[in-house]
Image (cartoon, helix red, strand yellow):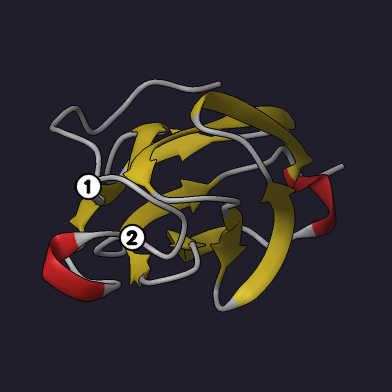
């Protein structure tokens, strides 16, 4: 992965919702659903094979998450905690792309604020 950007990853937080009296669809209190892009950082320059790192926490029951590049899913996540998705940028034209993560559980659906990454592969 190339250098660049810095800054914090994008974070999305979900409010408490669900069943009666603050209880989730299963049982017990519903924790806030959170999804965060760990890397790459906003405006980072990348090339070749890279890893997108995403962290999911909270929520209730089964979760489904995806990482999207310009609105197209490039990988799925089905567990809480930090996860990685490998991606080869060589198939993309050089330029700026929008990256975001989306997550849902039984009660909520959240997505991160988009970050931008700059694909800069060598031209052969």
Q: Where is residue 107 in the image (x, y as percent from the top left)?
A: 39, 72
Q: Position of residue 43 (x, y in %)?
A: 29, 46
Quarter where residue 71 is shown: bottom right
Answer yes or no: is residue 56 visible.
Answer: yes
Disc assigned to residue 44: none
Q: In which quarter of the image is the C terminus?
A: top right
Query: What residue is shown at x 30% (from left), y 28% (from top)?
Result: 4
Q: Which of 115 and 89 is in front in this view?
A: 115
Q: Where is residue 2 in the image (x, y as percent from the top left)?
A: 49, 22
Quarter where residue 18 is shown: bottom left
**Dot 2, how many residues are within 10 Å of its Cα: few (below 14), some (14-19), or many (20+)?**
many
For disc 1, the marked residue is 29
Q: Quadrant of the N terminus?
A: top right
Q: Which of 58 and 3 is in front in this view?
A: 58
Q: Do the residues labelled 1 and 2 touch (CB within 8 Å)?
A: yes
Tell me the SS state at disc 2.
loop
Q: Where is residue 96 in the image (x, y as percent from the top left)?
A: 45, 63
Answer yes or no: is residue 15 visible.
Answer: no
Taking 30 as reference, is 53 left or right?
Answer: right
Tell me the SS state at disc 1.
loop
Which mark is first along the chain, 2 or 1?
2
Disc assigned to residue 24: 2
């Amino acid at each position: 992965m190339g250098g660049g950007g810095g800054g914090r990853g994008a974070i999305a937080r979900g409010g408490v919702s669900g069943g009666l009296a603050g209880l989730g669809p299963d049982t017990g209190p519903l924790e806030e659903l959170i999804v965060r892009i760990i890397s790459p950082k906003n405006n980072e320059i990348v090339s070749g094979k890279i890893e997108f790192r995403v962290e999911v926490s909270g929520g209730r029951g089964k979760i489904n998450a995806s990482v999207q590049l310009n609105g197209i899913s490039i990988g799925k996540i089905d567990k809480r905690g930090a996860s990685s998705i490998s991606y080869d940028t060589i198939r993309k034209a050089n330029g700026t792309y929008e990256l975001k993560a989306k997550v849902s559980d039984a009660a909520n659906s959240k997505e991160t604020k988009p970050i931008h990454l700059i694909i800069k592969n060598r031209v052969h």
